[in-house]
Each structure stands twice: as C-alpha cells, then as structure tokens.
Amino acid sequence: MLVIRRRPGEAICVGEDVEIEIIECGPNRVKLGVRAPRQVAVWRAEVSATRAQNIAAAGWAHSGHGAAPGGVPARWTAKSRVVPLVRGSRE
Amino acid sequence: MTIQTIHFGRLEIEDEETILFPQGLPGFEECRRFVPLHRAEVPGLVFLQSLEQPGLCFVAVVVRPLWPEYELWLSGEDREVLGLDGEGEGDLADDVVALAVLSFTEGEPPTANLLAPVAICWGTRRALQAVRRDERYSLREPLPAMEEASCS
C-alpha cells in the first residue's frame, strides 16, 4: 500500500483523471474531495459489499421465478404508505 | 410517460410518481429513476421498477412493520442528497420511508438488506441507499413473520 502524507488543501492524483483533495482534517475524520469523470463510480468502501448484494438482489428476474403474477400493480405513493417511518439520527 | 418493463409489461406513469436516486444505487449507478409499485393484496411489499432498464426491478419490504425497532441512519451527506434541510426530525418521520431490498436464493428463504436500506423522501421524491456504518444489521437479514406479511 502506498502511504503519502498530505495537508489540507493538498491533493493526490490516481491515473490521469482522478484527483483526491484533502479538504479538512479533524481529530477523527478526514474530509476528502474526489474529482473524477462521471463514469468512475466513487463509493465508501463499505458500499462495495452493498453493490454485490444489489446485483444479487436484482437477479431474481433471471432466476426462473419469473415476473410477479397478477397483472399491473398499482403505484406505491405516499398515500399508500403502510406505516409512516422512522427517524434519522444526526451525525 | 409510457415505460416498458419486463415484469409488468407497459406502464403508463406520471412524472410525480417517480423517484430520483441522484447517485443511483451501488452496482446500478446509471439507473437514477424508479417508480415504486405495490399490490394491494401484498401490503408492505414494494417493487422498485427502473425507468431506464426494463428488466431492473428490486423487490423490497417496508422496514417499519417488520422491524419496529429499526432506526434509519442518515448522514449529513445523505440528508443533502435527499434534499432534507436537516431541521425537525419530527418532519422526517412523516416524510422518509425505509425499504429493505430483498434477495432471493434458490431453495432458501428470502433475506432483506438492512445494512443498506433504501430511504425515500416523499417531499422531494429523492431516494438513496443509505449504508449504515455500524454492524447491527447485515446485508442478508432473515425476514421475521414473512408468512404473515405476505398473506394478510
């Protein structure tokens, strides 16, 4: 693994098109800015497991389970919410 | 507008029935617009049909009825993506719904992704997959009382 020391305001480049800038440095967290072409996906590392799971989840259509039977489904809108949800927590 | 879907055929939908994932979903970054569909006979089950890909349709469950203690976790960045101003958590409760995407494996019961629920904000019609940073829930949580949920 390449290890580089950088200060806020400095940046590193990955290949020709990707630049990662250190915007802010706190005691526990670093704020990074990533400049990359639109087709380059930039995700937090924990998101990559989610990616694999999403691809698996989308595969039901091709698994022989076939389409959901029963004709055209209705739109699911705010009105058809079963139960209102959930609070978020702040960072 | 009219959209083609593989599972539901041709659908006539209104613009205000669609939701936008400004960042797409991991693995499907290019798919930004979805229409949530449901069937009255299967309450709590939601089909997230892509407008861009006729064959892409996630099956999800509304989190709250199945996991009443579940708390959606949204970072400040997540709130910005959803278009929330960060004020008033009471409003958030009414306006944001969490869905868990289901996975189906042949011969096994379906599982729900509670590590990365899909959060939809009705007010802005924006959505994202909000990956938790704790380890309380996994990508493949067993479903509690699935029979109840699908037969009621």
Image (cartoon, rainbow, N blue to C red):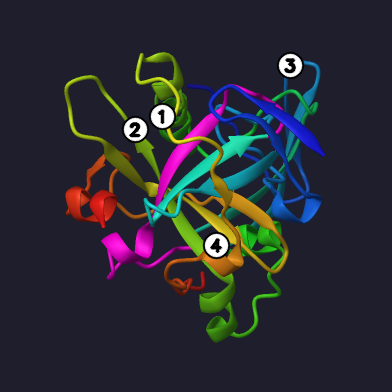
How far apart are the two marked residues, 1 and 3, measured between alpha carbons?
Answer: 32 Å
**Residues flagged by tags 3 and 4 on a common chain:** no
Depth check, front residue: A59 or A34: A59
The answer to whether dots 2 and 3 both sit on one chain is no
How far is the residue under mark 4 from the one under mark 2? Answer: 25 Å
- Residue B43 appears at what percent x and percent y? 38, 56
Residue B111, magenta (yes or no): no
Side of A45 relative to B123 (left or right)? left
The numbered mark at residue A57 is 1
Query: The residue under label 2 is which amino acid type?
Result: Ser
**Subunit bearing disc 1:** A
Q: Looking at the rendering, which quadrant does residue B85 occupy?
A: bottom right
Q: Quadrant of the C terminus of chain B?
A: bottom left
Task: Tell me which chain the residue with mark 3 is part of.
Answer: A
Which residue is denoted by mark 4 in the rendering?
Answer: B75
Residue B10 in sight from this viewpoint: yes
Element assignment for label 3: loop
Three-letter code for the amino acid on which mark 1 is drawn? Ala
